[in-house]
Structures are given as C-alpha cells and as structure tokens.
Image (tube, rainbow, N blue to C red):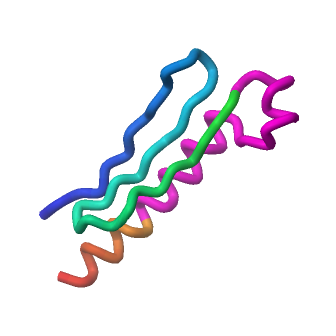
Amino acid sequence: MSRIRLIKHESVTQTGSYEVRFPDGRPSVYYNFDDNPGRRSITEKMTSEEALQAATALARAEQDKLSNAR
C-alpha cells in the first residue's frame, strides 16, 4: 500500500514548509511556516508547530480515506 508522505523543507533556518505528498499523483499540499515573530507578523505564516499539526491532520485524514477505500 502506498503511503502519503510528510516532508519538511527548510532551506533557511526558522522558515520553510511541510509538504504532504500523495502517492496517486495529486499535487502536493504545502503548509508554510516562519518561526521568526517579526517576519511572521508580516507574512502571516504559521509557526512550524502549527504547520506540522495542519500537515499531519491532512495526511492522516487522506491516509484513512485510502485505507477505507481498499
């Protein structure tokens, strides 16, 4: 069974994204984060913890759908 992957991208310290990658070829979903409070207030991004929680919730929900469809 193919699994949904959760991939962290962080090319600059304290900023990046979590990618939810689907095995069926659908476009990935990205949750961008910024842990610098000053930048975050300007860019309106989530903290890394909030982004991880959102990405994990989506990945689990989609994985459950895949498991139930079989």
Q: Is residue 48 left or right of residue 1?
A: right
Residue drawn at point x = 41 percent, y = 61 percent? 60
Residue 46 covered by magenta stretch: yes
Residue 51 against residue 14 in the figure, above or below: below
Residue 69 against residue 59 in the figure, above or below: below
Q: Nearer the viewer, residue 2 or 13?
A: 13
Residue drawn at point x = 12 percent, y = 64 percent? 1
The quadrant holding residue 64 is bottom left
Residue 30 against residue 64 in the figure, above or below: above
Q: Nearer the viewer, residue 49 or 9?
A: 9
Residue drawn at point x = 25 percent, y = 74 percent? 67
Q: Extreme top residue here?
A: 13
Residue 64 covered by magenta stretch: no
The quadrant holding residue 37 is top right
Quadrant of the drawing holding the C terminus = bottom left
Residues in magenta, as a range: 35-60
Q: Extreme bottom residue here?
A: 69
Q: Is residue 58 left or right of residue 24?
A: right
Image coordinates of residue 58 in percent, x first then y, are: 48, 61
Image coordinates of residue 28 in percent, x first then y, are: 40, 56
Residue 9 against residue 18 in the figure, above or below: above
Residue drawn at point x = 30 percent, y = 56 percent? 4
Q: Main secondary structure of the magenta part?
A: helix
The quadrant holding residue 69 is bottom left
Q: Is residue 66 left or right of residue 44?
A: left
